[in-house]
Image (cartoon, coloured by chain):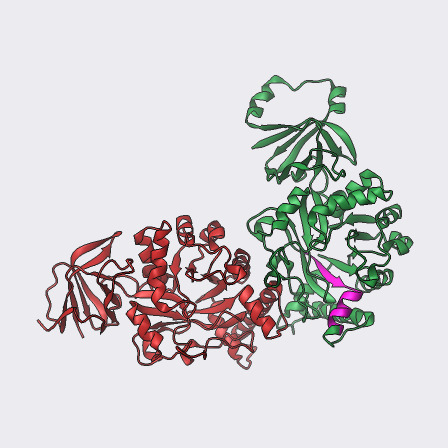
């Protein structure tokens, strides 16, 4: 099965250009021709080729915009299914303190309406993480927005380990009258488990090793550098604490939320930090959000950080991802970088930049056709392809 | 005791075949056919009534719940992982429900602890005729019951347990199975002699693949969590309840995972029952999944097993497969198809005689035989002794 998108404006190699045709075959993009390159070559498609193309579906995209599927690199989609309530809240294992062994992948609910909403918002891939109640919250996964089972949607079952700094763990355990109720306590819990994991790794290589411990097993891929640390941190000092721990244990770390990132932009730039910023559209509902601004993204990008935007669904609805990018444009960011913040950059942050985030030959055919400029809030998705299948 | 059923209809290749005789001797089916001549203690003249294998409910808490009280021996609410609980130690054979089961034509039940804890105990297969559970016992360790989803979450929340999400439940089960694997490995390596652990011992047959993981799961996601764990630990798997199993018909068919389906005749009183439909059985069977019906006693009265099969016919299932889903399919899911589920020479003498078609709810059970023990429920039944 072959699909050909003809004409229209494509976001290609970092800018909007005029498309001649984009060919999708076997779930991948197999050809992209621009009108400019075609004009240069001055060649018309040779006649014999037409025969093979008779089986192809051709879609005329004149006056429409063709973009890679958006990626939200930090969500909780379906962990708390919408419109259901407590029964389907599988968000925080909030009495467990350190729960590296729990996996978001085991609580996905593929019939959550949010998956469909995501597609309508042009989002085709999302990272899904446990909540931020625990200093160590559990394992994140990466899935596409289609599939009857989590297995059918999966890109990575376990892509990262969630850590939380700042107000959330402090509040949750403080209210339970348990340790930790300070930022020091939270850092100590995290450090304690990472130390244990390091020692466990050493012990596992010796002959005395007998029985596995599930929590430490879960931390091994992190210690060995196979998965990334995802640090929930809003306040500047919490971001720095997270970085300190990452240095101590040699972790590959991504900063999630990064609300006060602009206050320590120089430092983050020096660290070549990767940050998933948002949900900026929320209210300043807790003290650590007091300095929230849509300018953070541009400031961090100017310092050389890789920045992606997030809705943190269900904190903000997933359809709002392109709206968040548009808000950054309103606050001074250029359109191209705003689009990169929901395509290329999250792909880099998730380690999927060889597959996703761009329209390039050989990349997954996650392609969205918009009936107008994607950052114009009035525009609508007209067609959505995931792995070459037309899902909308 | 030897019994002969004369002039009876028995199920044969999709229909009921009239004019048959069935001989039961020493607790077994000794002969089936139209030309049996034999001196027996009891002759039952059946006048073209319907004889089927004793019905089997592959998932129940029969005898663990105490009828007419609020007392049960089903749930152990203050412990999460109790694979060492044995139904045999809690079954009350003189409970009224046991008589109700016999009156409903049920000769065999899988009895298990409750589904409110991640791992609640082993499953045992019992007949309904015994005076003590040990007499009726067919297989004691026939599986390990595990539970996923809403019920476990609710119970955990009410009990203020340390896990309240699906991720937590799955992690707890995974942790236990990891321990069991390591325990079994240590036990096998002769160097490491160690003290036995009662819960780990109960899991060894599961780890070795001798018995199935019986996973209680309603929602598709919870079913997939069970499938994932079974794959990871290379376990045999049976899905219990399976309210949304029809959404995964292909996955379950490909992996050859049977479903013990039900209870369907209940209201949607929990969110996880939202997609409940009587069409499930047909969808699953058409895809090639083995399906048995259950009434999950006391989820539903034990008498409703036959009703579940009849309701599925109303929603498009054929009679043959509906009947198989309460006789030979549960026998095969329980791994006792060599003994139960069919009217065939050599199998256990478990037979139910109905006044009319067994899936017509108006039909009355007239007699039940379990291991050759005769229970008569109709005054009009013509029984003569010796000839």
**Which residue sits at x=54%, y=63%?**
B233
Quadrant the C terminus of chain A occupies: top right
| Region in magenta | A159-174
Q: Does the magenta stretch include residue B171?
A: no
> Quadrant of the rendered structure where residue A157 is?
bottom right
Residue B102 percent across, percent down from the top left: 29, 71
Which image quadrant: the N terminus of chain A? Answer: top right
Horizontal side of B218 relative to B108 (left or right) equals right
Q: Which residue is drawn at 88% across and 51% down?
A: A269
Residue B331 in view of the camera:
no
| x and y, in percent, of residue B198 in the image | 51, 79
* Residue lying farthest to the left in this orientation: B387
Name, please, the residue furthest toward the right: A266
Q: Residue at x 62, y 46 (%)?
A: A116
Q: Chain A is drawn in which colour?
A: green
Q: Where is residue B6 in the image (x, y as percent from the top left)?
A: 14, 63
The hue of chain B in the figure is red
Q: In which quarter of the image is residue A360?
A: top right
Q: Residue at x 39, y 56 (%)?
A: B290
A293 displayed left or right of A10: right
- Residue A259's place in the image compared with A67, above or below, is below
B285 left or right, relative to B83 = left
Q: Say above or below: A301 vs A252.
A: above
Looking at the picture, does residue B103 appear above or below residue A247? below
Q: Where is residue A221 in the image (x, y as percent from the top left)?
A: 69, 60
Residue A378 in sight = yes
């Amino acid at each position: 099965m072959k699909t050909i998108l003809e004409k229209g404006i494509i976001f290609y190699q970092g800018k909007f250009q005029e498309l001649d045709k984009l060919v999708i075959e076997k779930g991948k993009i197999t050809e992209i021709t621009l009108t400019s390159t075609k004009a240069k070559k001055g060649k018309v498609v040779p006649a014999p080729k037409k025969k093979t193309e008779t089986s192809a579906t051709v879609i005329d995209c004149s006056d429409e915009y063709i973009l890679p599927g958006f990626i939200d690199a930090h969500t909780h989609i379906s962990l708390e299914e919408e419109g259901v309530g407590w029964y389907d809240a599988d968000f925080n294992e909030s009495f467990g303190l350190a729960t590296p062994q729990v996996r978001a992948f085991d609580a996905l609910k593929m019939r959550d309406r949010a998956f469909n909403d995501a597609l309508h918002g042009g989002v085709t891939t999302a990272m899904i993480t446990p909540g931020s109640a625990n200093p160590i919250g559990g394992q994140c996964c990466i899935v596409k927005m289609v599939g009857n089972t989590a297995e059918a949607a999966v890109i990575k079952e376990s892509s990262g380990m969630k850590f939380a700094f700042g107000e959330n763990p402090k509040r949750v355990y403080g209210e339970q009258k348990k340790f930790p109720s300070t930022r020091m306590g939270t850092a100590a819990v995290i450090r304690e488990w990472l130390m244990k994991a390091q020692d466990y790794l050493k012990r596992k290589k010796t002959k005395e090793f007998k029985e596995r411990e599930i929590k430490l097993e879960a931390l091994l891929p992190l210690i060995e550098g196979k998965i990334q640390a995802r640090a929930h941190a809003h306040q500047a000092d919490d971001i720095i604490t997270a970085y300190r721990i990452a240095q101590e244990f040699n972790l590959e770390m991504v900063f999630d939320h990064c609300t006060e990132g602009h206050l320590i932009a120089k430092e983050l730039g020096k660290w070549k930090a990767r940050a998933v910023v948002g949900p900026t559209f929320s209210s300043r509902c807790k003290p650590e959000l007091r300095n929230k601004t849509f300018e953070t993204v541009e400031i961090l990008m100017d310092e050389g950080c890789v920045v992606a935007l997030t809705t943190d669904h269900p904190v903000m609805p997933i359809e709002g991802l392109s709206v968040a990018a548009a808000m950054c444009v309103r606050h001074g960011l250029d359109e191209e970088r705003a689009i990169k913040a929901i395509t290329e950059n999250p792909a880099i942050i998730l380690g999927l930049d060889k597959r996703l985030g761009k329209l390039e030959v050989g990349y997954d055919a996650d392609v969205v056709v918009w009936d107008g400029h994607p950052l114009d809030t009035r525009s609508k998705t007209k067609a959505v392809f995931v792995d070459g299948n037309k899902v909308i | 005791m030897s019994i002969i059923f004369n002039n009876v209809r028995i199920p044969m290749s999709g229909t009921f075949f009239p004019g048959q005789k069935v001989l039961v001797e020493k607790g077994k089916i000794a002969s089936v056919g139209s030309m049996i001549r034999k001196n027996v203690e009891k002759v039952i003249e059946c006048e073209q009534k319907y004889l089927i294998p004793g019905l089997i409910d592959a998932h129940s808490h029969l005898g663990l719940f105490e009828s007419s009280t609020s007392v049960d021996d089903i749930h152990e609410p203050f412990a999460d992982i109790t694979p060492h609980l044995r139904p045999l130690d809690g079954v009350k054979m003189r409970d009224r429900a046991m008589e109700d089961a016999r009156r409903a034509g049920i000769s065999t039940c899988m009895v298990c602890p409750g589904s409110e804890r991640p791992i609640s105990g082993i499953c045992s297969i019992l007949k309904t005729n015994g005076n003590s559970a040990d007499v009726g016992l067919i297989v004691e360790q026939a599986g390990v019951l595990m539970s996923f989803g809403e019920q476990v979450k609710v119970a955990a929340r009410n009990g203020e347990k340390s896990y309240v999400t699906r991720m937590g439940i799955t992690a707890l089960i995974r942790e236990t199975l990891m321990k069991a694997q390591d325990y079994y490995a240590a036990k096998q390596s002769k160097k490491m002699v160690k003290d036995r652990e009662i819960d780990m011992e109960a899991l060894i047959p599961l780890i070795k693949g001798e018995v199935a993981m019986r996973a209680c799961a309603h929602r598709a996601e919870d079913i997939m969590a069970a499938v994932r764990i079974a794959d990871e630990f290379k376990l045999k798997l049976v899905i219990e309840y399976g309210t949304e199993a029809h959404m995964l018909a292909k996955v379950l068919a490909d992996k050859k995972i049977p479903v013990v389906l039900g209870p369907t005749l209940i209201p949607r009183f929990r969110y996880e029952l939202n997609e409940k439909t009587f069409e499930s059985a047909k969808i699953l069977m058409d895809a090639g999944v083995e399906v048995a019906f259950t009434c999950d006693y006391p989820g539903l009265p034990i008498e409703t097993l036959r009703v579940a099969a009849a309701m599925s016919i109303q929603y498009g299932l054929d009679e043959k497969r509906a009947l198989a889903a309460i006789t030979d399919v549960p026998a095969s899911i329980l791994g006792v198809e060599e003994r139960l589920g069919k009217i065939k020479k050599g199998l256990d003498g478990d037979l139910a005689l109905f006044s009319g078609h067994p899936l017509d709810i108006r039909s009355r059970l007239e007699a039940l035989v379990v291991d050759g023990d005769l229970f008569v429920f109709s005054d009009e039944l013509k029984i003569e002794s010796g000839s």
